[in-house]
Image (tube, grey):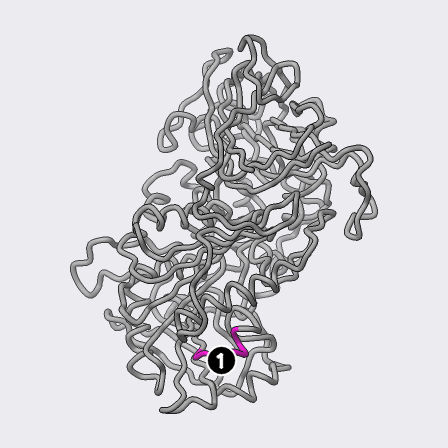
Amino acid sequence: MKIYVLIICFWAISIQSFAQAPAANPFIKENYNKFEYQIPMRDGIKLFTAVYVPKDISVEKKYPILMQRTPYSCRPYGTDQFPARRLGPSEFVLKDKYIIVYQDVRGRWMSEGVFQEMTPQIPNKKSKTDVDESTDTYDTVDWLIKNVANNNGKVGQWGISYPGFYASAGTLSGHPALVASSPQAPMADLWRDDSYHNGAFLIPHNFNFYPYFTNRTDGTPTKTPSAKEFNYGTEDGYAFFLNLGPMKNSQKAGLYEGKDPYWNGNLAHPNYDQFWQSRNILPHLKGIKHAVMIVGGWYDAEDLHGIFKTYAAIEKQNPGIYNILVAGPWTHGGWNDTGDQLGSVNFGEKTGPYFQENVERKFFAYFLKGEGDAKFPEAQVFETGSNKWRNFDAWPPKAAVEKNLYLLPTGKLTFDAPATSSGFAEFVSDPKKPVPFTETISLEMNRDYMVEDQRFAARRPDVLVFQTDVLDKDVTLAGNILANLKVSTTGTDADWMVKLIDVYPGDAKDNANTAKNEKMSGFQQMIRHDAFRGKFRDDKTNPKPFKPGEVTNVNYELIDILHTFKKGHRIMVQVQSTMFPLYDRNPQKFVPNIHNANESDYQKATHRVHGGSLLKVRVVD
């Protein structure tokens, strides 16, 4: 298993980023001229920029500019080299023709300067040396408008994942020519997106990525990633990472060896300290004047948090602007695929091409070319379970009714408040035998794990199962979910993983996508899950241990869904303390920095979920 394969499914490198030149797309060569520039920024640094201009551009026929800024390379380099697949966000946009621009961000590939991971935003700039991604966007837009002949004076931008972050930061440039932005699956807050989930470290996301995310050094361009590969010795990620032991062992010979600054930064900052706070773009998303469209997928394993929190932050901090949300049954960047199925789950239609043609294409055409109209709903979202698109005038829907789903110690899950909150359900968690997050044998994170059948976990003694009676009518949940747990442990630290699951009836039939080793009869489809490291229950900047045996509250958010649990199905909740190796193991003994833990620190503990525990949900018709 080559690590470079993992890069594509992890940080969703845009399709353009790694397009190779040998077989150039004939439409591009026939319809576009290519130019390359080193565009100067206000502090003197030059950023490499590739500009593709329609051949029929003229004084009479002008085109708007559509730009992506990326850390993943805007190659192929050379004015005679063209991408093999496409330009822009889709084939529809490509054939509509725009001036398409790609730019290597600071310190990456052919651009000068020093790269910073998730460049901190500088809110109060005092000199021309106070630069960030918003100033680089402004300077780039300004140069393009003034130097690319016969543009129509309007600029749009888009990007997926890391380029989505640059699109978010670019909305803050304030340049009057920037009239439309589409951050798609945007990274927003690394401690809550790709690096950590509420303090639980995401191993495959990071371990397999950073060896290939090298920096520009000594003033020379970033080199193409080498063929170097960690000596895993196995294709079994569960076995490899379990045998690796504590994360500090990742620094041994043949692995990171303490040399990677980004990997080291992750391990050195397990708490939500200034290192992470400065890289959170969400509080800065203010003063935006132009149209914004946030795009994301329900099954985005990388940046689910960034999708909905970016939309919410822009909506709250820029009242009255044109800001819309689109969400479909997609993985990270999955709207560039057919989007009709994931794993054994079928969505009934090709949602990816539908979005590309009927939403994304029309959004840019209206705001950049003045074609069509902008009568998009505030939230255009795909309802899984019932498999249909729905439009809402707000997200979450204003009509949604807040309800509680109670986790009873008997294993029952119910919307009816119990007469008593006494009792508990308990399990023994052994970090040396963690619950796997998937049945797939792989070193990476399989893209379909977010809808995977959870029966393998439900059958383990270290997973608590709560489920409703068979539903006598459809139940549709919309918006985020709040887990309010009352817990105790015999240890001094513990992780808590909550999974919301749709249990199919016994007579459910297989579909065309059902995997050979699966059956839809009794299928336990994961709808949403997330993790929380218990020591952050009161303060994510200052962790504190549990007192053994003391009942305490652990409250946290599971990111948004729109899903219908059909009549005849059941709603299930599973609670566990490990999902390995998706999340790193908690020693269950309080250690200030878990990445410095010793093997002897890992110990069994008995965890209890007490009566009064519940999920806060929203129900919509």
Q: Which residue is rendered at x = 36% and y = 47% of the image?
A: 313
On screen, residue 23 above or below 220: below
Which span is picked out in magenta?
Answer: 93-99
Q: Residue at x 54, y 79 (%)?
A: 95
Q: Quadrant of the C terminus?
A: top right
Is 351 within the magenta?
no
Provide the secondary structure element on which disc 1 rests: loop
From the viewer's perspective, is 345 left or right of 145?
Answer: right
The residue located at (45%, 20%) in the rendering is: 553
Image spot of residue 356 (x, y percent) = 56, 65
Q: Is residue 95 magenta?
A: yes
Q: Amino acid at mark 1?
A: Lys
Instruction: Find residue 109 and report its image quarter.
Output: bottom left
Position of 617 relative to 608 (above/below):
below
Q: In front here: 403 or 465? A: 403
Decide if residue 49 is on the left or right side of residue 457.
left
Instruction: Measuring from the top left, give residue 349's x and y in whole percent.
Output: 68, 57
Instruction: Give percent across and percent down for residue 360.
Output: 50, 65
Up-down: is 512 above or below 218? above
Tell whether 392 sits left or right of 541. right
> What residue sits right under mark 1 in the picture?
97
Q: Nearer the viewer, residue 69 or 329?
A: 329
- Camera sees residue 265: no
Residue depicted at x 65% and y 29%: 572
Mark 1: give few (<14), some (14-19) or many (20+) Cα within 10 Å. Answer: many
Identify which residue, 523 or 454, lies in the foreground: 523
The spot of residue 523 in percent (x, y) is 75, 37
